[in-house]
């Protein structure tokens, strides 16, 4: 059952809430305006609006901002087992250009997890209307990230060394 | 009269130090040098750019690398051409806190339609903190 994220109630002692409490201190995520909608052990949903401040030289949303949106999700999903994890490798493919001012959505999943490494996949998309007014899901980018799991807890608790 | 090239626009931006992109203003990144196939961006990191672990978010480094690679590639194009990044990969080697970073983008290969570009980001001790590669596509 996914957690509907609510900062006011994010104080219970489970590992998802530990990382969501940490997320409250993520200043760069706040600067970009990225929001967590849902989180469970293996999936995450987020949204972010592409404000003008996030535009590049050509007045279009900067590719690095799209990457950052996925990277924020990556940091949450790879750290949601109370085991500090750091990104070691990320790659992103851009499929369609987002529009300035558009709201982006993200769906992320954990593909594999071992004692030392975890791999995750993130789909960034926008919702647009076609000429008939039907909603269309437009793929914006896909990012794959690998994290190194340090074995150190974010908050003191049971050993996380062998935790998958 | 010779055809105007994108590098001429980029040189004006570097020489006038005008704000060229809103994202640069937001994070404090400066476009400091442009040559044929090579672009440099610099950034003084502060805690606005930190993630919840207290280090600079990987996305900030990627914004720098993407900007350096994009403009390095753009510097080889005519002013009426446009391009898009279709794929980008980055590896992180060291965490960054309050430090001065320099990102240098360099075009490794360019064809009529595509470009293969790489970027290195180094800290104030000249240590490599991240390396990125990307593929760009010329649209027009």
Image: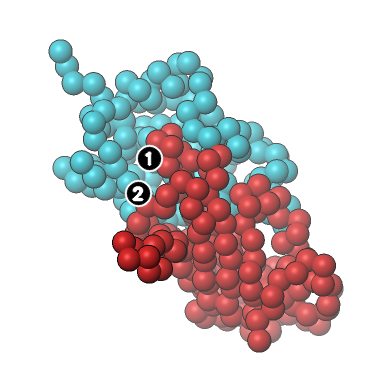
Q: Which residue is mark 2?
A: B85
Residue A125 image offset from top left, x and y in percent? 44, 64
Q: Are marks 1 and 2 on the same chain?
A: yes
Q: Residues within 10 Å of mark 1 (few under 14, many from 20)?
A: many
Q: Residue at x 45, y 31 (%)?
A: B40
The relative height of residue A104 versus residue B140 in the rendered view (above or below) is: below
Q: Residue at x 24, y 44 (%)?
A: B138
Q: Nearer the viewer, residue B69 or A17?
A: A17
Q: Residues within 10 Å of mark 2 (few under 14, many from 20)?
A: many
Q: In this orientation, does residue A79 appear? A: yes
The relative height of residue A12 versus residue A37 in the rendered view (above or below) is: below
Chain B painted colour: cyan
1 and 2 marks in contact (CB < 8 Å): yes
Left or right position of A12 against B64: right
**Helix, strand or loop under label 2:** strand
Residue A42 image offset from top left, x and y in percent? 59, 80
Residue A26 image offset from top left, x and y in percent? 71, 55
Q: Quadrant of residue A131?
A: bottom left
Q: Chain of mark 1?
A: B
Q: Which residue is mark 1?
A: B70
Residue B96 image offset from top left, x and y in percent? 65, 46
Specify the quadrant that holds the C terminus of chain A: bottom right
In 3D space, how far apart are the residues under numbered discs 1 and 2 (Cα atoms)?
A: 7 Å
**Nearest to N terminus: mark 1 or mark 2:** 1
Left or right position of B62 against A142: right
Q: Residue at x 31, y 51 (%)?
A: B135
Chain A painted colour: red
Q: Nearer the viewer, residue B48 or B100?
A: B48
Specify the quadrant that holds the N terminus of chain A: bottom right
In the image, farthest residue toward the bottom = A1
Q: Residue at x 63, y 69 (%)?
A: A37
């Amino acid at each position: 059952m996914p957690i509907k994220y609510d900062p006011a109630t994010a104080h219970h002692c489970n590992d998802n809430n530990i990382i969501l409490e940490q997320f409250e201190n993520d200043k760069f995520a706040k600067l970009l305006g990225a929001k967590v909608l849902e989180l469970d052990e293996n999936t995450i949903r987020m949204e972010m609006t592409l404000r003008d401040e996030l535009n590049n030289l050509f007045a279009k949303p900067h590719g690095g901002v799209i990457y950052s949106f996925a990277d924020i999700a990556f940091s949450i999903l790879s750290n949601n087992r109370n085991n500090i994890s750091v990104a070691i490798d990320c790659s992103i493919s851009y499929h369609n250009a987002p529009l300035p001012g558009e709201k982006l959505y993200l769906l992320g999943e954990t593909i594999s997890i071992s004692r030392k490494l975890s791999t995750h996949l993130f789909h960034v998309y926008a919702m647009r209307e076609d000429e008939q007014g039907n909603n269309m899901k437009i793929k914006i980018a896909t990012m794959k990230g690998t994290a190194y799991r340090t074995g150190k807890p974010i908050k003191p608790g049971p050993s996380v060394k062998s935790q998958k | 009269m010779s055809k105007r090239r994108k590098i001429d626009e980029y040189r004006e931006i570097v020489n006038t130090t005008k704000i060229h992109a809103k994202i640069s203003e937001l994070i404090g990144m400066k476009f400091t040098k442009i040559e044929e196939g090579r672009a440099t961006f610099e950034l003084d990191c502060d805690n606005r750019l930190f993630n919840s672990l207290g280090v600079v978010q990987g996305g900030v480094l990627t914004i720098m690398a993407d900007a350096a690679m994009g403009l390095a590639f753009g510097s080889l194009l005519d002013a009426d051409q446009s391009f898009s990044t279709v794929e980008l990969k980055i590896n992180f080697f060291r965490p960054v806190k309050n430090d001065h970073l320099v990102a240098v983008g360099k075009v490794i290969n360019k064809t009529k339609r595509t470009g293969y570009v790489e970027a290195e980001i180094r800290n104030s001790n000249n240590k490599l903190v991240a390396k990125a590669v990307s593929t760009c596509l010329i649209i027009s």
